[in-house]
Image (spheres, rainbow, N blue to C red):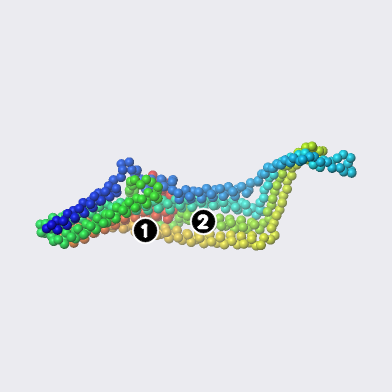
């Protein structure tokens, strides 16, 4: 009797300790501070897009592309150069000539000259315009790349958001399962005392309850991990609350219409198209190296000296033109041209390949959406049946018409149905966003999201 009482006392202490742990975890999981900010999915989108390092990095790429266009434009503008010099000599010197009786000044005391010069050089092929066009296309490409980065980042936010909600629901399901098994264990314990059940039924109930406690602990830590991941991605405070997004209404999605419009809506695909045009401009630029280069210049020059002479020219204006053409450079121009042609072929191949990838992504996301939509309807029906079945089995068990095995089976079915339905709801919402991402309409949807 003493040994049995000791075992019961140890068991009671373990139960008490576990209840304290569960209570503490529940307080952390479900009761945030009163001033904790609540975020909708749209709030997370707009907040993260403003402060994300990844987005800022892509914006810097766009800024660099714009400065590259400024550099290409500067080549077309004439260059102005101002100059001036002043020389102070140790003494003035004179020279004597047999043809002149008076000495000739050959070194004054000081000399000053100044002026301004304008230079412009260009190729007769106008390859500088090709470079300017290339730089402008690079700006457009960077804009498309920025939009593509935003779309991918927004989808990553949505994934973390729904994973957090799934973890929260899993924790709630685990808590409800533990509560059901606790009530069942208590019921078995009462019936054991009056001799209606055997010890094995209680041991089975205790084993199932221990498993439920283990699952609850796992769900608690998974929920904490999901919250930490979302907080890191979106850069928000750790103490936050999430407001669930309502399920999107069932709407007809025309796959063929999306496939026809994806060329004009997918930013990353348009980036590949621009890259193909840039490669064509690069070929034109390389071909222009076979044309002569022309240089124009104009100079205004001023001059003064002390002492001044009658032959001193105080100012002069001149202009000139030069033409240069490299006759031999070891095959460099031809190699550059061939390299540009090879890159042009690569750009076309990359565009064609990525276009196929985009089409497959769109079809897969569409099929996933249809699958999740149909699965959700069936799982919701399964949950209703599982709840009714569990309630009926519990009533039968309390009246002695069902066994403990029947209760365990009914509870397992209900637990599985609850988990599956919660996962299916969030998977369906995420699948809807994936269709928007693969069709290129996600950013437009986000901009309308408030």
Q: Position of residue 449 (x, y in %)?
A: 39, 46
Which residue is depicted at the point 71% across and 45% down? 298
Which residue is depicted at the point 53% across and 54% down? 274
Q: In the orientation shown, which residue stands out farthest toward the front?
A: 2
List the residue tagged with mark 2: 273
Where 73 falls versus 102 (above or below)?
below
Q: Position of residue 394 (x, y in %)?
A: 17, 56
Placement of the C terminus among the 4 image quadrants: top left
Q: Position of residue 64 (x, y in %)?
A: 53, 49
Q: Is residue 128 visible?
A: yes
**To which quarter of the image does residue 112 belong?**
top right
Report the Cα–Cα distance between label 1 and label 2: 28 Å
Q: In the orientation shown, which residue stands out farthest toward the left?
A: 194
Front residue of this view, candidates 211 and 138: 211
List the residue tagged with mark 1: 368
Assign a secondary structure to mark 2: helix
Q: Tell me which numbered mark, 1 or 2, is placed earlier along the sequence.
A: 2
Q: Is 322 on the left-hand or right-hand side of 95? A: left
Q: Is residue 411 visible?
A: no
Placement of the N terminus among the 4 image quadrants: bottom left
């Amino acid at each position: 009797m003493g040994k049995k009482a000791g075992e019961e006392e140890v068991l009671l202490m373990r139960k008490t300790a576990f209840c304290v742990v569960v209570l503490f975890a529940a307080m952390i999981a479900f009761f945030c501070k009163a001033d904790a900010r609540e975020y909708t999915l749209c709030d997370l989108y707009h907040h993260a897009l403003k402060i994300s390092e990844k987005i800022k990095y892509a914006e810097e790429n766009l800024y660099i592309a714009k400065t590259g266009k400024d550099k290409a434009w500067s080549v077309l503008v004439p260059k102005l150069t101002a100059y001036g010099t002043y020389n102070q000599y140790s003494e003035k010197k004179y020279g004597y000539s047999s043809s002149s009786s008076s000495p000739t000044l050959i070194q004054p005391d000081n000399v000053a000259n100044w002026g301004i010069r304008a230079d412009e050089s260009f190729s007769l092929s106008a390859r500088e315009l090709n470079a300017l066009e290339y730089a402008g296309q690079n700006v457009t490409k960077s804009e498309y790349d920025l939009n593509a980065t935003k779309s991918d980042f927004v989808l990553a936010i949505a994934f973390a958001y729904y994973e957090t909600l799934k973890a929260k629901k899993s924790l709630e399901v685990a808590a409800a399962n533990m509560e059901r098994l606790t009530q069942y264990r208590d019921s078995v314990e009462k019936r054991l005392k009056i001799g209606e059940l055997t010890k094995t039924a209680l041991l089975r109930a205790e084993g199932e309850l221990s498993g439920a406690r283990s699952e609850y602990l796992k769900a608690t830590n998974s929920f904490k991990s999901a919250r930490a991941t979302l907080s890191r991605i979106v850069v928000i405070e750790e103490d936050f609350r999430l407001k669930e997004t309502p399920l999107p209404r069932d709407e007809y999605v025309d796959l063929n219409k999306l496939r026809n419009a994806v060329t004009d809506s997918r930013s990353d695909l348009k980036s590949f198209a621009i890259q193909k045009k840039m490669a064509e401009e690069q070929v034109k630029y390389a071909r222009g190296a076979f044309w002569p280069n022309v240089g124009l210049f104009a100079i205004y020059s001023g001059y003064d000296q002390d002492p001044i002479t009658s032959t001193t020219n105080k100012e002069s204006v001149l202009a000139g033109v030069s033409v240069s053409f490299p006759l031999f450079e070891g095959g460099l121009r031809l190699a550059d041209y061939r390299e540009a042609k090879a890159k042009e072929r690569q750009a076309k191949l990359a565009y064609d390949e990525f276009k196929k990838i985009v089409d497959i992504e769109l079809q897969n996301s569409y099929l996933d959406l249809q699958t999740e939509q149909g699965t959700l309807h069936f799982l919701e029906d399964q949950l209703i049946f599982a709840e009714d079945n569990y309630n009926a089995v519990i009533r039968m068990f309390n009246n002695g018409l069902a066994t403990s095995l029947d209760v365990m089976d009914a509870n397992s079915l209900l637990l599985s149905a609850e988990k599956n339905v919660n996962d299916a709801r969030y998977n369906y919402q995420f699948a809807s966003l994936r269709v928007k991402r693969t069709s290129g309409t996600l950013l437009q949807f986000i901009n309308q999201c408030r």
